[in-house]
Amino acid sequence: MTEPRPPALLRAAEIRARESSHSHPWNPQSQLIGLRLSTATGLQRTGVSLVRLLVRLPPGKESFVYHAHRFEEEWIYILSGRGIAEIDGAEYQVGAGDFMGFATPGVAHHLRNPFHEPLQYLMGGENREFEIAEFPRLGKRMVRAGTEVTVYDAADGRPFGPLK
């Protein structure tokens, strides 16, 4: 007989069975396997994901793309393995037990795995109604209002009238 469980509880076996692969469309080296734990349990204002960054096989695998958040705080906690975190243009080796927190407005950051072992981490942050993300190396800006996402070339931005 199966034990009844509330929707708020995800068992480890169910998490593994529901994991899927994701990548960022602007980074062909991006490949993550995981599950948005927050979405799976119905959380709407908080985001938490379990992510496995695969073992590096040439040419290597990375998280999404070098980016910064304007309004949503984000954090990463390394569960196992090693990686290279790029934070505000500097690189740092990170490993199990290391925590990174990106307050807003945030500095640009990115995570990659150049090592020969899997890198697994928890990632989370806010799910606000409005967000702006900057992609400084790509010259792009993403604006999200609810479920509507628009991407602009940052160079196309212009000042808009007197705001004082």
Image (cartoon, grey):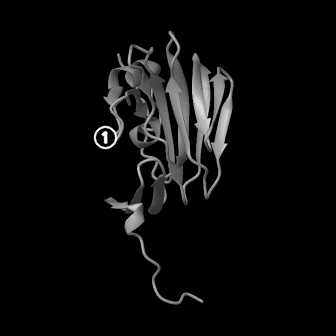
Q: Which residue lies at the image location 47% right of the left edge and 88% below the top edge?
A: 161
Which of 7 and 160 lies nearest the eye of the viewer? 160
157 versus 13 height, above or below: below
Instruction: List x then y, in percent, for residue 159.
Output: 47, 79
Mark 1, Cα crowd under 10 Å, few <14 / some 14-19 / many 20+, is few
> Where does residue 132 sit, x and y in percent of width and height?
47, 60
Q: Is residue 33 left or right of residue 90?
A: left
Examine the rendered structure and indicate whether residue 12 appears above or below residue 99: above
The residue singled out by tag 1 in the image is 25
* Up/down of 130 relative to 14, above or below: below
Q: Which of the 4 image quadrants contains residue 92?
A: top right
Assign the C terminus to one quadrant of the image: bottom right
| The N terminus sits in image quarter | top left
At 52% from the left edge and 22% from the top edge, which residue is drawn? 120
Residue 86 screen position, x and y as percent: 59, 35
Residue 148: which quarter of the image? bottom left
What residue type is disc 1 on? Pro
Q: Residue at x 32, y 27 (%)?
A: 20
* Percent coordinates x, y for residue 124 in the rendering: 54, 41
Judging from the image, what secondary structure is the residue with disc 1 in? Answer: loop
| Residue at the far top in the pictured view | 116
Residue 20 left/right relative to 51: left
Front one among 135 and 49: 135
